[in-house]
Amino acid sequence: MTAGSQRTALDAVHSARPIVARLSTSRDKEDLAADIIDAWTAVETGLRSLVGGSSLGGQALIRELRQRNFLSLDQANSLAEFHAARERAGRTDYAPTDADVNATRDAFLKLESGLMGETAGVRPPPTVNAPVTTPSAEAAALEGAGMQRTGRSRPGWFIPVLGVVALIVVAGFAWMAMGSRSSSSASFDQGVQAYKEGRREVAEAAFRKAVADAPSDPMPHVYLARMEREAGNLGNANTEAVNGVRLGPTNATALRELGSTLFAAQQFDDARKFYLRALTADPNDKLSQGFLGCSLMRLGRIDEGQRWIGRAGPGVWSACSPSAGGLPPQQVPFTGAPRP
């Protein structure tokens, strides 16, 4: 799979986004069925692009991509459910159900997120991607991240010189960062203030200007993702959140926001991974700790989830814990997803 084929596939999948966004609107069954069929057609075009064009379609195409490891098992299963919904929608005597809509949306979000991660080069660090052998492996990886490693002894002058070199390098990066943010900081600050005051249109315009002024700054994308997520536009939220992580792969706030977007989309295992990455970047982030616990509880890992919620302390995530007197995990509303 080449970078060109990935980009072509992503463009085709992106073309389905407005169609998928319409699925949540209440309309007659003919329009809903047509949208499911059109969304599948766009996604199928993207899937064919991954193999440089193919005469295969439907389940056969999904199997081929899975055999080539172009799709994860989760993506393949979601796409199979999406295709089944598309086949049902093609019957004139069938009225699409909420399950069909959810299957369409779920498969689209998972495929788009995966393709954007591939084209943007977003990869979890080895500590997160390593095979998990026990439920507490992620916690052990995080808790051990700050431990010193033993090795060969260094000359006495090595550490001081290394410290000076590190300071010079950090100063250089800081200078470059100040230069890149100076033109956008005013727009970004205006956006943050407008967002706090509830002036969402003004905030969005300011963040868009900040993106144009400093294309390498992840934070405007983080706030745009948050605003889209709060409005329920999860497709757009995912796009902005992925852009934020692409630009700031070690930015704890960007990583957390992508986790929150995935959590709102009920992709709890993917949310767990990005909350872990956020905690690798900032081990003291209470929001990531709390909603990592919620994600784990949604995955049935109750004991481990409660430990993370306990570590985070009281917060909106406490509703995930039955022992805290809140809602059981399956009833926690998604409208309370965390803010950066």
Image (tube, rainbow, N blue to C red):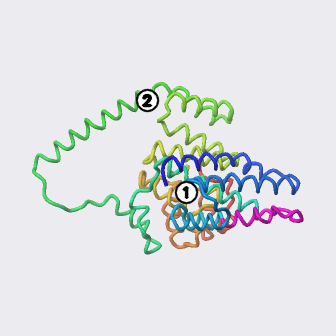
Residue 46 is situated, as x and y percent measured from the top left of the image, at 62, 52
Disc 1 versus disc 2: nearer the observer: 1
**Residue that sits furthest to the front in the current view:** 55
Identify the mark nearer the N-term, 1 or 2. Answer: 1
Indicate whether residue 193 is drawn in magenta: no
Instruction: Indicate the position of residue 143 as horizontal and vertical percent values.
Output: 38, 63
Q: In the rendered image of this protein, does residue 174 appear above or below residue 30?
A: above
Residue 180 - label: 2
Q: Mark 1 highlights which residue?
A: 51
From the viewer's perspective, is residue 225 above or below residue 35?
above
Q: Residue at the spot x=74%, y=48% of the render?
A: 19
Q: What element carries label 1?
A: loop
Q: Is residue 253 visible?
A: no
Q: Give the range drawn in magenta.
A: 80-99
Which residue does the image show at 32% across and 58% down from the upper left? 146
Which residue occupies the foreground of this view, 331 or 94?
94
Dominant secondary structure of the magenta stretch?
Answer: helix
Does 69 sit above or below residue 181?
below
Q: Is residue 96 left or right of residue 121?
A: right
Residue 280 picture quarter: bottom left
Disc number placed over residue 73 in the picture, else none = none
Residue type indicated by callout 2? Ser
Residue type indicated by callout 1: Val
Q: Nearer the viewer, residue 80 or 127?
A: 80
For marks 1 and 2, give the CA distance: 39 Å
Q: Nearer the viewer, residue 68 or 13?
A: 68
- Residue occupying the point 44% across, 56% down: 124
126 relative to 69 in the view: left or right: left
Which residue does the image show at 57% across and 47% down from the upper left?
8
Give the number of marks.
2
